Image (spheres, rainbow, N blue to C red):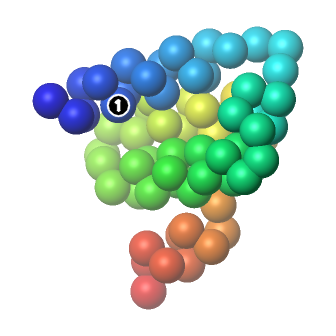
Amino acid sequence: MLGPRLRECARIVAGIEGRSAQQVFGFPDDLKLRSCMTLFALSTEDAADFTAVLDRFYGGEQDPATVGAALP
């Protein structure tokens, strides 16, 4: 149940235009968004919904701390 809803939320967030992640979510939740989208993208073969959020708000860059923690 979580998977489809999480993907739907990611698609909605990726569709937000004209505002930064910090403007939408505030600090520090904008940082948490990047970390979560990175983790979810690393955790699935079909990462398109999560990478779309990273593309939209972070220039496609994953969170380096999350990558470091997830991939020893």
The image quadrant that residue 19 belongs to is top right
Using the rendered image of the protein, determine whether residue 60 is visible from the camera's viewpoint.
no
In the displayed structure, 14 sits above or below 25; it is above
Q: In the rendering, at what x and y percent does residue 41 appear?
A: 44, 48
In the picture, measured across the screen, residue 2 lies left or right of residue 54, that is: left
Residue at 60% across, 32% down: 53
In the displayed structure, 63 sits above or below 3; it is below
Q: In the rendering, at what x and y percent does residue 13 appear?
A: 58, 22
Q: Residue furthest bottom?
A: 72
Residue at 82% across, 29% down: 23
The image quadrant that residue 72 belongs to is bottom left
In the picture, measured across the screen, residue 29 lies left or right of residue 12, that is: right
Quadrant that contains the N terminus? top left
Residue at 50% across, 51% down: 36
In the picture, measured across the screen, residue 12 lies left or right of residue 57, that is: left
Mark 1: few/some/many CA within 10 Å (<14, 14-19, 20+) = some
Residue type at numbered disc 1: Leu
Residue at 60% across, 45% down: 33
Q: Secondary structure at mark 1?
A: helix
Q: In the rendering, at what x and y percent does residue 35 appear?
A: 57, 56
